[in-house]
């Protein structure tokens, strides 16, 4: 079985793509190759994971300047030609598109060559690449039921999340409260700038509270200094560039302040209440749409960045952290939205389509 996985750019695309690739290789004996671009995280993460990576030249169309759009349009035919060459030479039984720059050309090339395609879409609102091919794919794996209508033969599988996160226990009654702040590998500027301004007052209002703040590597020195300058008790606040022990961090947290990208699937798996602040510049406003669905399910509250001030954030965090019953209700609702076994379901879907093709 040969499978071509196309897409990437950000960790939200690359990390689940690698999980799918490993599942197909290890559980189904597939030969897996990746297609990406030179500007994405795939250039480092895919080779590190031991998979071959083919690069094509294609750029952004959303939230960029007119000149960038013109360059992308000019590069698109070359990207398509390269993808046609890759599909013809590798002869995959199925092409999986995970979204991102390279996904669209590779999926369109596969459709033109009548190779079955599977779209993977973790967000409530599909990105441009998946919207373009949605009605032409053989099947799709989605996270939200509301997303299924964008695709042909969509199945609500959920998002690949580590089993250790599903195993996170409920918080023990009487445990010292903790706030976890996380926003992907780069952190969030709005959190890094605002939280140090309110941390001292928040710690005073919530007895025993500790804060773990993931700032991103570049922002770590400035964020840590901002907390120090605010006179915050250093024993109650930990600022770190990156968190590699997420199951342990979720287990120790009563509330998570986060963006609303791929993190929402982990929050559901861990059963963690959250205050979600969607990234306003996210393509197609997909983070806001993700957050709205989690809020609708009862697992989170949402605060739009345009409405976020130090005082508003202080009041929202204080209200949640001092209402144990509210947090327990949100935790149960979040856990009910978790979808265990997503990776196995996606692997079986892809392998089944590949088997029929063979």
Image: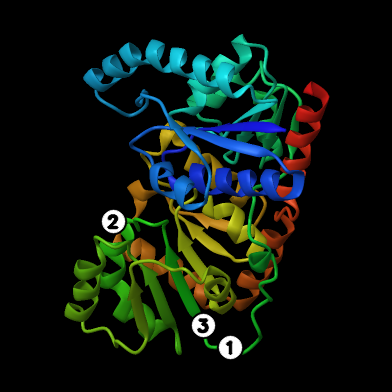
The crowding category of the residue bearing disc 3, from other C-alpha atoms within 10 Å (few below 14, some 14 to 19, many at least 20), is many
Image spot of residue 48 (x, y percent):
46, 52
Q: Please give the name of the residue rendered at 35% of the width and 58% of the height, measured from the top-left corner.
A: 187
Q: Please give the name of the residue rendered at 49% of the width and 48% of the height, measured from the top-left corner.
A: 261
- Contact, mark 2 vs mark 1 (Cβ under 8 Å): no
Position of 128 with respect to 344 (left or right) is left
Q: Please give the name of the residue rendered at 66% of the width and 86% of the height, measured from the top-left corner.
A: 173
Query: What separation in Å lies between label 1 and label 3 (alpha carbons)?
Result: 6 Å
Image spot of residue 56 (x, y percent):
40, 25
Query: In the image, which is nearer the foreground, mark 2 or mark 3?
Result: 2
Quadrant of the rendering where the C terminus is positioned: top right
Quadrant in the picture for residue 190: bottom left
User: On the image, numbered disc 2 is attached to which residue?
Assistant: 189
Position of 21 with respect to 303 (left or right) is right
Image spot of residue 44 (x, y percent):
39, 48
206 over 355 or under it: above or below: below
Q: Earlier in the sequence, mark 2 or mark 1?
A: 1
Residue 330 appears anywhere in the view: no
The crowding category of the residue bearing disc 2, from other C-alpha atoms within 10 Å (few below 14, some 14 to 19, many at least 20), is few
User: On the image, numbered disc 3 is attached to which residue?
Assistant: 177
Position of 53 with respect to 341 (left or right) is left
Question: Who is closer to the viewer here, 200 or 76?
Answer: 76
The number of callouts visible is: 3
User: On the image, numbered disc 1 is attached to which residue?
Assistant: 175
């Amino acid at each position: 079985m040969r499978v071509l996985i196309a897409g990437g750019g950000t960790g939200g695309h690359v990390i689940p793509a690698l999980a799918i690739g490993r599942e197909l290789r290890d559980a189904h004996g597939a030969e897996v190759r990746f297609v990406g671009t030179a500007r994405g995280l795939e250039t480092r993460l895919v080779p590190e994971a031991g998979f071959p990576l083919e690069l094509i030249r294609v750029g952004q169309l959303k939230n960029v300047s007119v000149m960038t759009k013109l360059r992308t349009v000019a590069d698109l035919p070359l990207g398509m030609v390269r993808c046609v060459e890759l599909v013809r030479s590798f002869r995959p039984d199925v092409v999986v598109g995970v979204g991102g720059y390279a996904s669209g050309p590779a999926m369109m090339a596969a459709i033109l060559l009548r190779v079955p395609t599977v779209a993977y879409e973790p967000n409530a609102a599909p990105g441009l690449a998946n919207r373009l091919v949605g009605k032409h794919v053989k099947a799709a794996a989605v996270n939200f039921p509301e997303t299924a209508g964008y695709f042909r033969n969509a199945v609500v599988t959920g998002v690949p999340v580590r089993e250790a996160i599903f195993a996170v226990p409920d918080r023990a009654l009487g445990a010292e409260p903790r706030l976890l702040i996380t926003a992907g590998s780069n952190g969030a500027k709005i959190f890094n700038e605002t939280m140090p301004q309110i941390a001292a007052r928040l710690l005073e209002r919530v007895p025993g509270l500790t804060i773990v703040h993931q700032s991103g590597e570049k922002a770590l020195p400035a964020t840590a200094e901002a907390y120090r300058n605010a006179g915050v008790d250093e024993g109650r606040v930990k600022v770190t560039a990156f968190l590699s022990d997420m199951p342990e961090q979720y287990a120790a947290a009563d509330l998570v302040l986060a963006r609303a990208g791929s993190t929402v699937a982990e929050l559901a798996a861990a059963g963690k209440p959250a205050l979600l602040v969607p990234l306003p510049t996210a393509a197609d406003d997909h983070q806001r749409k993700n957050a709205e669905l989690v809020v609708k399910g009862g697992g989170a509250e949402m605060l739009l960045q345009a409405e976020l001030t130090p005082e508003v954030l202080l009041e929202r965090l204080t209200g949640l952290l001092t209402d144990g019953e509210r947090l327990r209700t949100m935790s149960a609702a979040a856990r009910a939205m978790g979808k265990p076994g997503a990776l196995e379901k996606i692997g079986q879907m892809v392998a089944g389509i590949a088997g029929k093709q063979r």
